[in-house]
Amino acid sequence: MTFAGIPAEAFDFYDALVADNSRIFWAAHKPDYESHVRSPMLALGAELEEEFGAGHLYRPYRDLRFSRDPTPYKDHQGYFVAARNGLGWYVQVAVTGLMVAGGWYSATPEQLANYRAWVADDEAGRLQGLLEETAAHGLVAGGQRLKTRPRGVAPDHPRLELLRHRTLFVAREWEPQAWMGTPRAVDQVRDQWRAMVPLIDLLAGVVGPWDPRRRG
């Protein structure tokens, strides 16, 4: 499967789906999803597999069991490649454009304790330094954060902002552009994922093993 780019029709498909997120629309336009979204994303993943590993294309259907939002389909398509300890790389197409991301998305209580203990002692500022390096590539830090400080952490702790994090990742998003419809798109994703590698490696070692049954 050769990757030729993410066609403009992928963004058109999601523009229409946002306007009519119904099973009737999906049934009528599923071939468009298969051709313009699913197949290109699988081809993109295949291009990246040798360097980053095999990935997983998320299902387009929303889980409605615990949601007040009745819309049945996701307004984006994501692809994830797992690294160690539950961390990994991510790429997504949506009406808003193409997004890349990577890092620590889901924490167990043990991982969170490991992270905070390590950051509290990180006097050399290794984590902050890696975040600054990724920022130089246009990547912005995000993640779940406490609104206040963690229990037992002093209000003047020099790494308070990092200690507030419950998860931590970096991401970059581009609005739809012509280069996305060309093979150049895989180079853009690959370059961004490579820039995330030192951060992902550090965080994976810091937080330790991940057990999905123990998510906080």
Image (cartoon, rainbow, N blue to C red):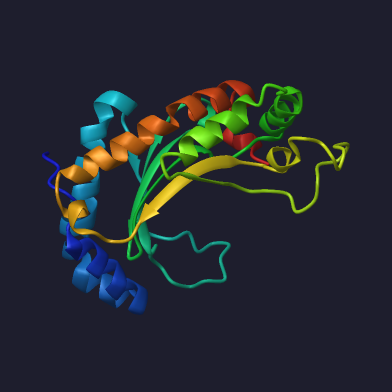
Residue at the limit of the structure toward the front, as seen here: 136
- Placement of the C terminus among the 4 image quadrants: top right
Residue 42 occupies quadrant: top left
- The spot of residue 151 in percent (x, y) is 86, 40
Residue 28 occupies quadrant: bottom left
Q: Is residue 103 left or right of residue 176?
A: right
Q: Residue at x 86, y 43 (%)?
A: 155
Residue 181 occupies quadrant: bottom left
- The spot of residue 37 in percent (x, y) is 23, 56
Q: Nearer the viewer, residue 149 or 52?
A: 149
Residue 6, can we see it?
A: no
Residue 88, can we see it?
A: yes
Q: Residue at x 73, y 31 (%)?
A: 116
- The spot of residue 188 in percent (x, y) is 27, 42
Where is 207 relative to 193, above or below? Answer: above
Q: Is residue 138 left or right of residue 2?
A: right
Q: Is residue 115 left or right of residue 130?
A: right
- Placement of the N terminus among the 4 image quadrants: top left
How many numbered marks, from 0 up?
A: 0
Q: Nearer the viewer, residue 144 or 62?
A: 144
Where is 198 relative to 170, above or below? Answer: above
Where is 3 relative to 200, above or below? Answer: below
Q: Residue at x 40, y 42 (%)?
A: 90
Where is 149 relative to 11, above or below? Answer: above
- The spot of residue 179 in percent (x, y) is 19, 52
Q: Is residue 61 left or right of residue 104?
A: left
Q: Residue at x 15, y 44 (%)?
A: 183
